[in-house]
């Protein structure tokens, strides 16, 4: 079992987050987002109108999906 202080591979973490966003984009658009498309997104690809096209509700859904996957709500940071 990895140490709680172990850091994940940044490239693997990036690929995971991009895949989560791609899933939400598929729901938002109602179409498939092909892997070559989302694998080509740059770190500075905008999630909003000038980039992937999420509106405010889509951004909330993408953030919520990321929060759910990483269980960030269990950390308790919202209390601060």
Image (cartoon, rainbow, N blue to C red):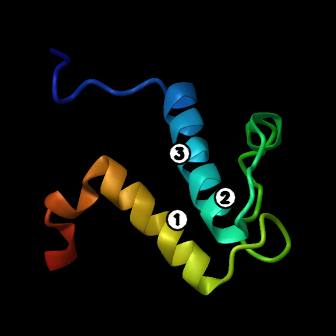
Residue pushed farthest right? 50
Image check: 77 left or right of 27? left
Report how far apart the C-alphas of labels 2 and 3 lie in the structure.
14 Å
Q: Give the structural element (helix, strand or loop) at label 3.
A: helix
**Residue 40 coordinates in the image, percent (x, y):** 81, 38
Image height of 6 relative to 55, above or below: above
Q: Can I make out residue 80 in this image? A: no
Earlier-in-chain disc, 2 versus 1: 2
Q: Is residue 31 at least partly visible in the picture? A: yes
Residue beneath label 1, please? 62
Instruction: Please state the horizontal and vertical placement of residue 76, each as a whole percent of the image.
Output: 14, 66
Counting other residues with Cα less than 10 Å from the Cα at mark 1, is it few (<14), some (14-19), or many (20 or more)?
A: many
- 34 versus 25 height, above or below: above
List the residue tagged with mark 2.
26
For disc 2, the neighbor class at 10 Å (few under 14, some 14 to 19, many from 20) is few
Q: Pointer 3: what residue? A: 17
Going by the picture, which residue comes out furthest to the bottom? Answer: 56
């Amino acid at each position: 079992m990895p140490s709680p202080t172990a850091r994940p591979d940044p490239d693997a973490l990036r690929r995971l987050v991009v895949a989560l966003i791609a899933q939400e984009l598929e729901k938002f658009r109602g179409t498939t987002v092909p892997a070559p498309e989302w694998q080509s997104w740059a770190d500075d690809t905008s999630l909003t109108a000038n980039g992937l096209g999420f509106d405010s509700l889509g951004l909330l859904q993408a953030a919520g999906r990321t929060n759910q996957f990483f269980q960030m709500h269990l950390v308790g940071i919202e209390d601060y």
